């Protein structure tokens, strides 16, 4: 079962590792600005750094609880600002934004679980705990 935790942790973190660098693109910054994100040229790349750092921390299992909190800090404003389905003008956009909102809520749940339980048995965190005993 220890390998299942490792695989799950890596799969969970891939979303943030892959999406983080895209937060530096002009397209992503422009999309966020068009959706009302204040100071998008700063906020979007900064959020990309948070997502990337949190994802790498969780994937490596190094300071994974801290990494999970970074993901929580990333997901809350992104979910509320970028997937505000309640403001959608048409039914198709609303359905898409509901799906994206719920995807982020489920990832938020996963991040909170990692923040509580940690990285699991195959991790740098676990090795550090074992070494200190």
Image (cartoon, rainbow, N blue to C red):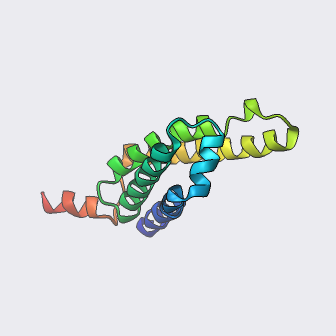
Q: Is residue 100 above or below residue 129?
A: above
Tell me the residue at 62%/35% (across/down).
36
Q: Is residue 21 above or below residue 50?
A: below
- Nearest the eye: 6 or 100: 100
- Nearest the eye: 5 or 114: 114
Considering the image in quadrants, where does the C terminus appear? bottom left
Q: Is residue 103 above or below residue 36?
A: below
Considering the image in quadrants, where does the N terminus appear? bottom left
- Give residue 122's quadrant in the image: bottom left
Q: Position of residue 65 (x, y in %)?
A: 34, 48
Q: Position of residue 40 (x, y in %)?
A: 52, 43
Q: Position of residue 5 (x, y in %)?
A: 45, 62
- Nearest the eye: 65 or 88: 88
Q: Position of residue 107 (x, y in %)?
A: 55, 48
Most extreme residue toward the left is 133
Most extreme residue toward the right is 91
In the displayed structure image, the side of residue 66 where residue 101 appears, left or right: right
Tell me the residue at 12%/57% (across/down).
132
Tell me the residue at 53%/36% (across/down).
77
In the displayed structure image, the side of residue 68 where residue 35 appears, left or right: right
Count of numbered circles on the image: 0
């Amino acid at each position: 079962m220890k390998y299942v935790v490792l695989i799950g942790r890596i799969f969970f973190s891939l979303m943030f590792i892959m999406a983080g660098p895209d937060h530096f693109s002009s397209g992503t910054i422009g999309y966020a600005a068009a959706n009302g994100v204040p100071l998008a040229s700063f906020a979007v790349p900064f959020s990309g750094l948070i997502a990337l750092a949190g994802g790498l921390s969780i994937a490596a299992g190094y300071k994974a609880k801290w990494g999970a909190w970074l993901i929580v800090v990333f997901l809350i404003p992104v979910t509320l600002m970028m997937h505000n389905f309640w403001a959608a003008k048409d039914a198709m956009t609303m359905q898409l934004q509901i799906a994206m909102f719920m995807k982020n809520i489920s990832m938020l749940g996963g991040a909170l679980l990692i923040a509580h339980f940690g990285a699991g048995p195959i991790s740098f965190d676990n090795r550090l705990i074992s070494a200190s005993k």
